[in-house]
Image (tube, rainbow, N blue to C red):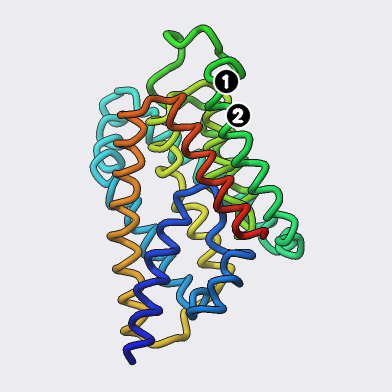
Amino acid sequence: MFQGIADALLSGILAALTSWLPMSPEGSFGRLIDGVISYTAFLVPAYAGIMFSVLYRYRERLSKEPLMALRGAETSELQYFVLGFLLTLLLGLPLAKPLTAHNAAFDVFNLILAFLITFFGLTWPGLTVLKGAEDRIPSKPSFLDAVLAGVFQSFSSTGGASRTGLVTLALVLPGHKAENVLEWGFLIAPAYHLIRLLYLGAYEGDTLLGFITAVTAFFVSLGIMEVLVRTAQHLGTRRFLTLFGLIGVLLNLGVLI
């Protein structure tokens, strides 16, 4: 029983941590960790915990904006959430199964994503679409941001590609600062987790252990999201993207090696 509790706790922690870094919680990483603990057996409750942590974090924003919409006020974050969510589901669900056979190739793909994020950080804002026009970049997500984030996120629906890496790249391209890239990336993540939950199916393990995993993932996910946003605020976009990308490079190299 002790081993089961330890596996449940560690699985929740690892799933939450890797979900918000430029790597995949599944794929080769999952198989590697399965050699030590029963990691993939707890992915369903872990993903459920992570999904609800995002909804909890943004509960006030998502509950207030419908009221603002009724009053005729601008509700860009709600529009971004709805459009990004729907695009992820519409494109991701058909892609989830066919692309799963190519999950091994996604290990290299994730490494390339991490390198690109690092490169964008080192050259910031030289390669962004609105380079040299930071004052024109909106502080609220636009229709284009929702389309880019939703389309890019849909390609991670197999579980092999890094959701965080793809969405980060999608939102960095227009030139958004790191804090917004993180927040908006978190905001539409439940669509990805919903697809993975549908694909993985029902959790068939011990109910208590599944609950432990879900609760652990919930709280660890909340903590990691807050730490990442605060770090981005402290370091600034250039340094944060460089550091964030380098962490992804090291982690993905570790998986490949």
- Amino acid at dot 1: Thr
Residue at 58%, 45% in the rendered image: 249
Residue at 49%, 75% in the rendered image: 39
Inter-mark Cα distance, 1 to 2: 6 Å
Q: Quadrant of the C terminus?
A: bottom right
Where's residue 189, x and y in %?
A: 46, 49
Residue 17 sits above or below residue 59 on the image: below
Residue at 36%, 28% in the rendered image: 235
Residue 21 sits above or below residue 50 on the image: above
Residue 101's quadrant in the figure? bottom right
Where's residue 215, x and y in %?
A: 29, 68
Residue 87 left/right relative to 16: right
- Using a 10 Å C-alpha cutoff, classify the residue at mark 1 as few (fewer than 14 neighbours), some (14 to 19) or many (20 or more): few
Q: Do the numbered discs 1 and 2 sit on residues whose CB atoms are within 8 Å?
A: yes
- The residue that mark 2 highlights is 119
Where's residue 80, x and y in %?
A: 45, 34
- Using a 10 Å C-alpha cutoff, classify the residue at mark 2 as few (fewer than 14 neighbours), some (14 to 19) or many (20 or more): some
Q: Quadrant of the N terminus?
A: bottom left
Residue at 26%, 43% in the rendered image: 63
Q: Which mark is residue 196?
A: none
Task: Please tell me whether mark 2 sits on a helix, a strand or a loop.
Answer: helix
Out of 33 and 130, give the one closest to the viewer. 33
Residue 20 left/right relative to 151: left
- The residue that mark 1 highlights is 123
Q: How many marks?
A: 2
- Amino acid at dot 2: Phe
Out of 104 and 244, give the one closest to the viewer. 244
Residue 24 sits above or below residue 31 on the image: above
